Amino acid sequence: GWRAALAGPAWDGQWYKRAFFDDGQPLGSAANSEARIDLIAQAWAVLSGVEGEPGRAQQAMASAHALLVDAEAGLIRLLDPPLAHADPSAGYIQAYPPGVRENGGQYSHAGIWALMAQARLNRPSDLPYQYFCHLSPAHRAAHPQQGPVYGLEPYVMAGDIYTQPPYIGRGGWSWYTGAAAWLHRAALEAIFGLKLEAQSLSFSPCLPAHWPEAELTLRRDGRQMRFILLRATPEQARVAAAAAGATLIDEGQVLRWQDLAPETCFVLPLTPIAA
């Protein structure tokens, strides 16, 4: 039933609709003058794992990137245009001023889900890391233009960031722990590509092109596992592994971590980026 709905009335031609009112009118459709496109519907078309028509999830996320991401301001809008006069009303989110919180602000949860969706669809790609920089309070606070406008602590997540004049880039509702937990998951699971399960783990990284190397140390059940993700040729990877006393592993290779020694090191070679 869900698959049939996604393939039929939920698809809007370039993206997925967000919802339907009781009278059947859509929300998040090109037919709407406000809230024409919504980020959550596009991200979860990917993250849900429900297969729709071929290529639709890719098209939906491409539309979201084109219509909801403001690279200059470093923002990923939840919906656009914001709600102001829509009838029927979309509910309490329409009571917020345009561009604040769920009414078209950068809502951290949804932005993080979009990051994870882009990593799942586009590997390799710099998009997930670009989204991470839009969402990270440390990156935003350190930016020469965005930092002074943001106005919040650089060491805790904000629930939302305003996207409309005159407050573009101002942070709201800081110390938002749920968003912090999701961003932590996105860094580990989407960018580093760690898939950790009860008895096994594997990596499918989506590191940005300008990172030649990255490391992750995982401590679990008395074990310390060090992983070096390295852009290298096979020969370079063998040399690096020998120097670190490490074992070479491949992308997607499954390790039964419960069977490993107390301290281990692995090198995962990634394809070098052409100059």
Image: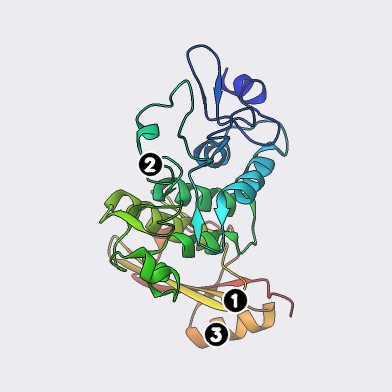
Task: Tell me the number on the disc at residue 210.
Answer: 1
Q: Residue at x 56, y 67 (%)?
A: 207
State which tag comes first along the sequence, 3 or 1. Answer: 1
Q: Residue at x 43, y 46 (%)?
A: 99
Q: Say what secondary structure mark 3 lies in.
A: helix
Q: Mark 3 or mark 2: which is in front?
A: 2
Task: Tell me the number on the disc at residue 242.
Answer: 3
Q: Position of residue 249 (x, y in %)?
A: 57, 68
- 103 or 142, which is in the foreground? 103
State which tag comes first along the sequence, 3 or 2. Answer: 2
Q: Is residue 202 visible?
A: no
- Above or below, 181 relative to 55: below
- 261 or 126, which is in the foreground? 126
Residue at numbered disc 2: 97
- Above or below, 233 relative to 24: below
- CA gap between label 3 and label 1 equals 25 Å
Q: Is residue 115 visible?
A: yes
The amino acid sitting under disc 3 is Ala
Q: Say what secondary structure mark 1 lies in.
A: loop
The amino acid sitting under disc 1 is His
The amino acid sitting under disc 2 is Pro
Q: Say what secondary structure mark 2 lies in.
A: loop
State which tag comes first along the sequence, 2 or 1. Answer: 2
Q: Position of residue 226 (x, y in %)?
A: 42, 73
Quick one: which residue is furthest to the left in this view? 175
Answer few, some or many: residues within 10 Å of disc 1's Cα (few below 14, many 20 plus, some between 14 and 19).
few
Answer few, some or many: residues within 10 Å of disc 2's Cα (few below 14, many 20 plus, some between 14 and 19).
some
Q: Mark 3 or mark 1: which is in front?
A: 1
